[in-house]
Image (cartoon, helix red, strand yellow):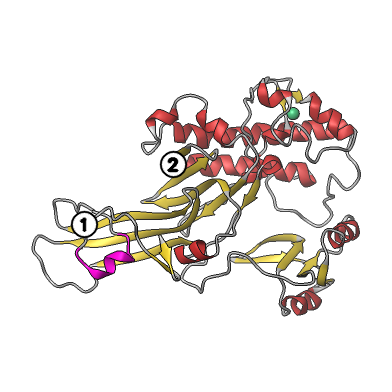
Amino acid sequence: MRTNGTAFVSYQPSPVDSEVGAERLFFPVDTPAKSGTARLWCHIYWRQVLLLQSRLIQAEVASSSILAPHAITSTVDYRLADPDDAIYQPRQPEHAASVTIGQEGGTHVLRVMATDGRDLLRAEATLGEGQLGNQIQLARSALRRVAWGGSEEPWQPGQDYRYERPPSLEQVTSDLILLAVNGYRLHHLLLQALGRGVGADPVRRRGPGREKRLRSPGFVQIALTRSAGHVVPAAMLYDLPLDSNAANLSLCADFVASAEKGELFGSACLTGTCKQASEPDPRLVCPGGFWGFRHALGIPLSIGGGPAVPMTLPYRDGVALAGGVYQDFPSAQGHVEALRGLVRWRDYRMGRDRLGTLEALGEQAQIVYFYCHGGVEGDVPYLRGAGRR
Ligand SMILES: [Zn+2]
């Protein structure tokens, strides 16, 4: 409930005997029977699905009542916004799901919230370090192979982008199959973990409910908490049934037909309505099975303890952009031109070298855009935009 800019609690789960009770939500919590440090993970969601904050609450439990000023601490593991921001500026798109990846006590914890607008799916699972790390490595090596033919090593000068020229149908087919097999295995690992997760709702865990809830295109938040050890290549997750060990996989005929006509955007495959989506044949790969093609994926980073960032960026008379492009990409020119034509820009500063890029970044911009190589030298991450000048 809310009046005159202040939110009031309309239902209080815990009895409270205080004036502050009208503005704060209190929950009853049982402490363990023995004394020591007790831990509680607290996750705050907006409209059930979008993760706003994740905190570790630690409390000193003692057998007798003593005055201890620092008996309760709250550590931010993920912070996208404060509840007030969401309440008073509720302009973020309605999310269909969120996937939170974190680490609690040495194991990876995966938490999924998903809705089809009616029912809510809530599931939680833990994964061993080796399992997740290996599968992510395999997925990344498939991406490297598709992009420049390498697999283990980072990109090196002299390696050509394999999609510089329009590819043959054979190349597209074998690449999509390679990505789907690896994306399917990664998705299967996560889904399998959720199936046996202790936190999964037992009623909804059975049956096809989960698949259905994530079937239609929607906004999906991938929340990497401070403790998350991995970045999951979420666009590659492939969730249609697939016989990943079959020797002769082929492409969905609807996809090939719409690609040949140049009508991929909005096609039946990418909106999850092609034949393969309704009656999946596990020997066929349909690009609509990739999360990156079907969903709008966001990986909003935690702002930690920093000042709140606005949920929406207002603009007038066009959008301002700053960034840089790696000039040696054969596709750089075409890419920049396509970007220029995308929306009405008020200010468009794309640096052509290091200094130009730094200068562009000094201006106020709503969008910061890079099209370049990146890597890690020693412990220092870098973007390789252009010459070193
Ligand atoms: Zn299809």
Check disc 1 and give the amino acid type: Pro
Q: Looking at the picture, which amino acid does disc 2 mark?
A: Gly
Mark 2 to mark 1 CA distance (whole Å): 40 Å
Q: Quadrant of residue 310?
A: bottom right
Q: Nearer the viewer, residue 135 or 94?
A: 94
Q: Is residue 24 visible?
A: yes
Residue bearing the label numbered 1: 15
Sequence-earlier tag: 2 or 1: 1
User: Ligand 1, what quadrant?
Assistant: top right
- Residue 263 placed where, x, y %? 86, 37
Residue 251 image offset from top left, x and y in percent: 77, 26
Q: Left of 303 or right of it: where is 104?
A: left
In the rendering, at what x and y percent does residue 199 appear? 37, 39
In this picture, is 295 found above or below 207?
below
* Direction from residue 176 to residue 129 in the image, left or right: left
Helix or strand or loop: what does disc 2 sit on?
A: loop
Circles 2 and 1: CB distance less than 8 Å?
no
Q: Which residues are magenta?
A: 17-25
Above or below 51: residue 126 = above
Does the magenta-highlighted stretch encompass residue 97?
Answer: no
Q: Using a 10 Å C-alpha cutoff, classify the residue at mark 1 as few (fewer than 14 neighbours), some (14 to 19) or many (20 or more).
A: few
Mark 2 — residue? 128
| Quadrant in which the C terminus is drawn | bottom right
Residue at the spot x=24%, y=55% of the render?
14
